Amino acid sequence: MIQDTAPEPGISKTAFVKKQKLIDCDVHVSPQHPDQIRKHMAAKWQDRFAMSGRDLYAHPTYVNRTDAHPPSGLPVGSDPDFLRKQLVDEYGMNHLILIQRPFTNPLPNPEFATALTAAWNDWIAETWLKAYNHDHVFKGSICVSTQDPLGAVREIERWVGHPHFVQIVTDSAAAAAYGQRQFDPIYEACERLGLPFAMHAGADGTGITSIPSSGYPTHYIEWSTLHVLSYQTHLVSMLVEGVFERFPGLKVVLVEGGVAWLPTLLWRLDTQYERFKKELPWLSKKPSEYVRDHVRVTSQPIERPSDRHLLKMLQLMDAEHILMFSSDYPHWDFDSPRLAFPKLPEALRNRIYYENARELYRL
């Protein structure tokens, strides 16, 4: 957690805003009332709908920043004026990539899961991307459920041409690793429409989804620490199964799953590839060589070694080309853009805070 208790030494808040362009790649927004979602659902689903989240591994203390409750009395993350004050006005952010969290991948009924994602997409399109978006600062994510790939494709295609949806998003929680071919229809649609495929941690091991560890964690701290295993599992699966050979235009975003694991994982995978490449005749290069062209990672929650080791870690993971800043607003471990990377070379800092996301999302 990096709270913004003071500006970076020697730099005023105003100076920071003027000198640094910013795109925040993980901002969570919520409806002001459940009826904002329910009204978009077919009558047969409305009685089933409830505003529920992840019940199995609930946060043991508090989820949100203590100062994130709007004076209006609206739920956290639902008041656009207050959110603008805390992010756009405070930091001069150019764009916010909004991610809604209906937690649909754990649901056993695929038809209901897709109907639920569609309702959330309708809601965010009519509010945050239209009624609240006079300055076009808000950019949205089309939520899909991966247990229903064909339904996911229909949902993606429903928003073709929308000016403010910039990516597809789903839970990292899934019943299978994302390199497997049942997910290909989703990737084909993403590639065809030029939309990145993003996954967000937070539902792994719940409902019908699996968790890539031995058994099930007992405590929240175990479960949240092991989010990195889901991302490693999906990334290795996509690299080994040849997803980026089948879909050479596909971009993938790993949101809120840590970053320090990436270099060592790729070292190990490349070593194994040299030994067992006969097993993977469809790959045209080493697994690690696909990452720069196809994979982006968001920064929060970045592991926090010393400044010297942090810079080395960023170099090893090729942060200049693949890392994008995210704050995880309005959650308790929000990363202030003033304090997240205070001692980086200016060129690297600009790539992380702005250019990598601008290029990916074509902003």
Image (cartoon, rainbow, N blue to C red):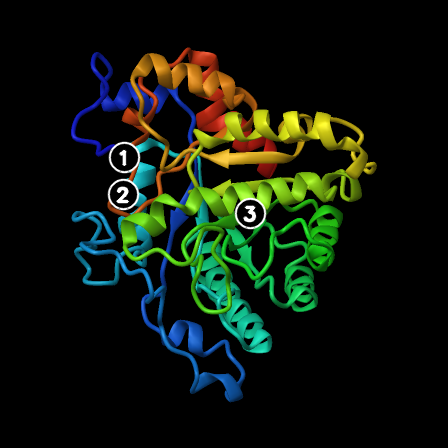
Q: Residues within 10 Å of mark 1 (few under 14, many from 20)?
A: few
User: For mark 2, what is the residue?
Assistant: 85
**SS of the residue under disc 3:** strand
Tag 1, which secondary structure?
helix
Q: Report how far apart the C-alphas of labels 1 and 2 lie in the structure.
A: 6 Å
One can see residue 137 in this view: no
Q: Are marks 1 and 2 in contact (CB under 8 Å)?
A: yes
Q: Residue 306, relative to residue 231: is it above or below? A: above
Between 360 and 71, the one lying in front of the other is 360
Q: Residue at x 38, y 14 (%)?
A: 344
Residue nearer the viewer, 336 or 270? 270
Q: Quadrant of the C terminus?
A: top right
Give the crowd class for mark 3: few <14, some 14-19, many >=20 residues within 10 Å.
many
- Residue 198: image tag: 3
Q: Amino acid at mark 1?
A: Glu
Q: Mark 2 and 3 residues: CB-CB less than 8 Å, in contact?
A: no
